[in-house]
Every structure is written in structure tokens, then in C-alpha cells.
Amino acid sequence: MGRFLALTGVDPGDIRALMGEEGFQIALLAHICGDESLLIDFASGENISPESVVAALAALSGPIMD
């Protein structure tokens, strides 16, 4: 989370308020999905599959086109 906060400039005290904003949710999921080891660690910690995290990102942001 520290790296995400540093990259985005988000203040830790603002996270609770931002969690309801779709743009923040997309940015956080994109950050997690952009680093395979972070994705695996996060999914493992939440007892969900990495694929479900990627699917959540796609559901919020729409499919990524090449």
C-alpha cells in the first residue's frame, strides 16, 4: 500500500473516503494487477483467486484493448 500511496500522492487519511469512488477502486486494482507477485500475495491474503481480482478490474474499468 505504501508504494501505491507514494505513486499516487494519496494521503493515507483520505483512503476511507476514497474507497467509495470508482476511479480510486480502479487505480488500486490496476496497481495490484500490474505486479504479479503483489497480485498473488493480495489474492492469497484475501482467499480469492488472482483471476477474480483481474475480473473485478475488468468489470469496473471495462476490457483493456491492445
Image: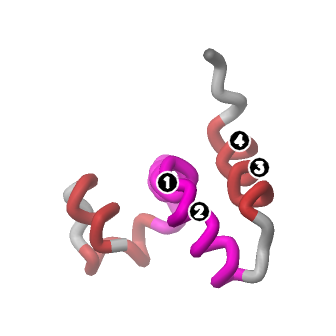
Between disc 2 and disc 3, the foreground one is 2
Task: Pinpoint residue 37: horizontal percent, then vertical percent.
Answer: 53, 63
Picture quadrant where residue 13 is located:
bottom left
The residue that disc 1 covers is 35
Task: Pinpoint residue 17: horizontal percent, then vertical percent.
Answer: 41, 72
The residue that disc 3 covers is 55
User: What span is in magenta?
Assistant: 19-46
User: Going from the N terminus, do you reach mark 4 or mark 1 first?
Assistant: 1
Secondary structure of the residue carrying numbered label 1 = loop
Picture quadrant where residue 65 is located:
top right
Label pair 1/2, CB-CB below 8 angstroms: yes
Between disc 4 and disc 2, the foreground one is 2
Task: State the CA–CA distance, disc 4 to disc 2.
Answer: 14 Å
The amino acid at mark 3 is Ala
Secondary structure of the residue carrying numbered label 3 = helix
User: Mark 3 Cα within 10 Å, few/some/many (few <14, many 20+)?
Assistant: some
Task: State the CA–CA distance, disc 3 to disc 4.
Answer: 5 Å
Task: State the CA–CA distance, disc 1 to disc 2.
Answer: 6 Å
Residue farthest to the front, as pictured? 37
The amino acid at mark 1 is Asp
Going by the image, does 8 lie left or right of 34? Answer: left
Task: Pinpoint residue 2: horizontal percent, then vertical percent.
Answer: 29, 72
Label pair 3/4, CB-CB below 8 angstroms: yes
Label pair 1/3, CB-CB below 8 angstroms: no
User: Mark 1 Cα within 10 Å, few/some/many (few <14, many 20+)?
Assistant: few
Going by the image, does 52 lie left or right of 43? Answer: right
